[in-house]
Amino acid sequence: MKKLLMSEIKPLNKNMGKYSKEKGIPLRTKPFIDVNTLFDKIVSPVLLKTERLTVCDVEERDAKDYYDLCADEENNKFWGYDYKKDLKKPLTKDYFYQTQLDLKARKEEYSLAIKYKDRLVGEIVLWNMTDEQAEIGYRIKKEYQGRGYAKESVKRVIDYLFSELSAKTVCARVIKLNGKSAKLLIDIGFNKIKEDETYYYYEKQN
């Protein structure tokens, strides 16, 4: 995903690059100094439990189910990112599994599997992490939608961010046509803070 929503960050020094206050997007004209973020507080592997679900790192044995989730173009029309734009090697069955490992190694995204009865049924992604804030994205496989799995797992991950990582703000964005996802965020205490031509933007404070 190439989505950005960050609170204003003040550069630690002149070598960190400029910052666009209007758009809330760092302008990476110069290298950033490596700073600690919420990503650095994550102790891997993550293992979170709810009444029905397990939220944990995506494992190699999940590769096929993860491929089915990520490659379903109809189901992912509201995901906000088309993987084909960055596809630079053959689309093998472990492509998405390896990609999320690469993103995790670069500290760009932390993907978590949503599992029901030890089977991957969806995903939660944490990204755009600063020292106080993270953005969250989520998706559920078509055959498991309508059962409340997204709400149940997202609530648990937000509790993890607030209670264990000491996050102060969790952000999310929703494509305007995705009313179900917008309702989910409102139901669990998010507030809409702005919108543009494509997205509604939400945040929840600790």
Image (spheres, rainbow, N blue to C red):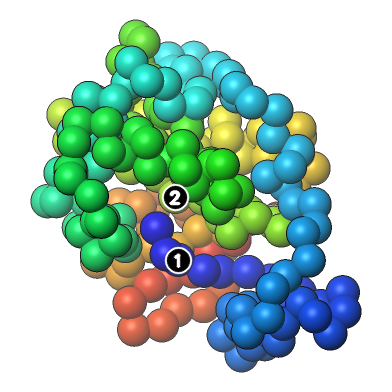
Q: Nearer the viewer, residue 190 or 105?
A: 105
Q: Residue at x 18, y 36 (%)?
A: 92
**Residue drawn at (27%, 31%) of the image:** 94
Question: Is residue 26 visible from the viewing direction of this image?
Answer: yes
| Residue on which the image places disc 2 | 137
Q: The disc labelled 1 sits on which kind of residue? A: Lys
Q: Left or right: where does residue 66 sit relative to residue 75?
A: right
Q: Secondary structure at mark 2?
A: strand
Looking at the image, which residue is at 54% across and 42% down?
A: 104
Q: Position of residue 190 (x, y in %)?
A: 56, 56
| Frontmost residue, 88 versus 141 | 88
Q: Are marks 1 and 2 in contact (CB under 8 Å)?
A: yes
Percent across and percent down for residue 4 are 51, 69
Query: In the rendered view, does 37 fall on the left or right side of 62?
Result: right
Label 2 Cα neighbours within 10 Å, binned few <14 / some 14-19 / many ≥20: some
> Does the rendering let one see residue 141?
no
Disc with the residue nearer the chain's start (1 vs 2):
1
In the depicted view, which residue is nearer to us: 175 or 74?
74
Query: Residue farthest to the top?
Result: 117
